[in-house]
Image (cartoon, rainbow, N blue to C red):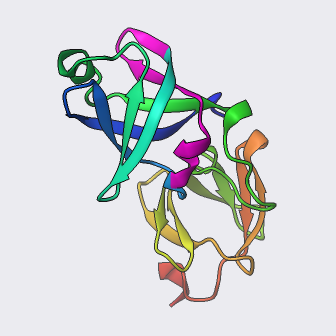
């Protein structure tokens, strides 16, 4: 499991005081109101910045980071990710997981046969869909429903599912 979780991606500067505009990579952008600091990851590694202020504009989060006091310094952070460590991550309800913990998990059917690995998670609104690819690059889209997903063991990188009839091409 990842030690740090991405909560946003800096896409631009904002104003003349060194604020940065970021796309939130979290289900609840208001979580930035509770953050005191974030790590900013770039090619040199990660740097911890205290958050001085947060505001919201057109689906974006505008953050003022300590030590970033002009547009030139803020511009150096463009395309970088804002992260938090797991200890300061949002507490998830039972039976919910961070997407980064699902990606890479091996998926097994009810017969213990390996279906492939989760390569992506699509968020459709009603339920997530796991994009699973096998060794021959065949793609299976598995709905993340309680009736389908029997067990998720992110520490073991394992997911057990019951495949609904007709989901696989060879069952039609």
Of 101 and 39, nearer the camera is 39
Of 97 and 85, nearer the camera is 85
In this picture, is 82 found above or below 103? Answer: above
Considering every residue shown, the one lying at the far top of the view is 44
In this picture, is 31 found above or below 69? Answer: below
Q: Is residue 152 visible?
A: yes
Write the start and end of the magenta stretch as one range: 30-47
Q: Is residue 119 visible?
A: no
Of 146 and 62, nearer the camera is 62
Is 109 inside the magenta-drawn segment? no
Name the residue: 42% across, 48% down: 24
Q: Position of residue 4 (x, y in %)?
A: 60, 29
The image quadrant of residue 109 is: bottom right
Q: How many labels sit on residues? A: 0
Of 141 and 60, nearer the camera is 60
Q: Is 31 situated left or right of 122 in this image?
A: right
Is 34 inside the magenta-drawn segment? yes
The image quadrant of residue 40 is: top left
Q: Position of residue 103 (x, y in %)?
A: 56, 48
Q: Position of residue 31 (x, y in %)?
A: 57, 48
The image quadrant of residue 111 is: bottom right
Check the picture and name the quadrant holding the N terminus. Answer: top right
Name the residue: 65% across, 27% down: 3
Q: Is 152 situated left or right of 136 in this image?
A: right
Q: Position of residue 34 (x, y in %)?
A: 62, 42
In this picture, is 4 found above or below 57? Answer: above
Name the residue: 40% across, 46% down: 55
Name the residue: 49% across, 76% down: 125
């Amino acid at each position: 499991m990842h030690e740090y979780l991405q909560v946003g991606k800096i896409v631009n500067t904002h104003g003349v005081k060194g604020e940065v505009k970021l796309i939130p990579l979290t289900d609840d952008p208001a979580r930035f109101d509770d953050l005191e600091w974030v790590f900013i990851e770039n090619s040199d590694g990660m740097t911890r910045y205290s958050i001085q202020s947060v505001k919201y504009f057109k689906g974006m989060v505008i953050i003022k980071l300590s030590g970033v006091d002009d547009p030139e310094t803020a511009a150096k952070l463009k395309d970088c990710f804002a992260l938090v460590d797991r200890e300061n991550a949002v507490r998830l309800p039972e039976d919910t997981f961070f997407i980064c913990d699902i990606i890479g998990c091996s998926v097994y059917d009810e017969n213990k046969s390996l279906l492939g690995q989760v390569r992506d998670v699509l968020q459709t609104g009603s339920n997530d869909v796991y994009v699973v690819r096998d060794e021959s690059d065949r793609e299976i889209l598995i709905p993340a429903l309680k009736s389908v997903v029997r067990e998720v063991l992110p520490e073991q990188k394992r997911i057990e599912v019951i495949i609904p009839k007709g989901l696989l091409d060879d069952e039609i």
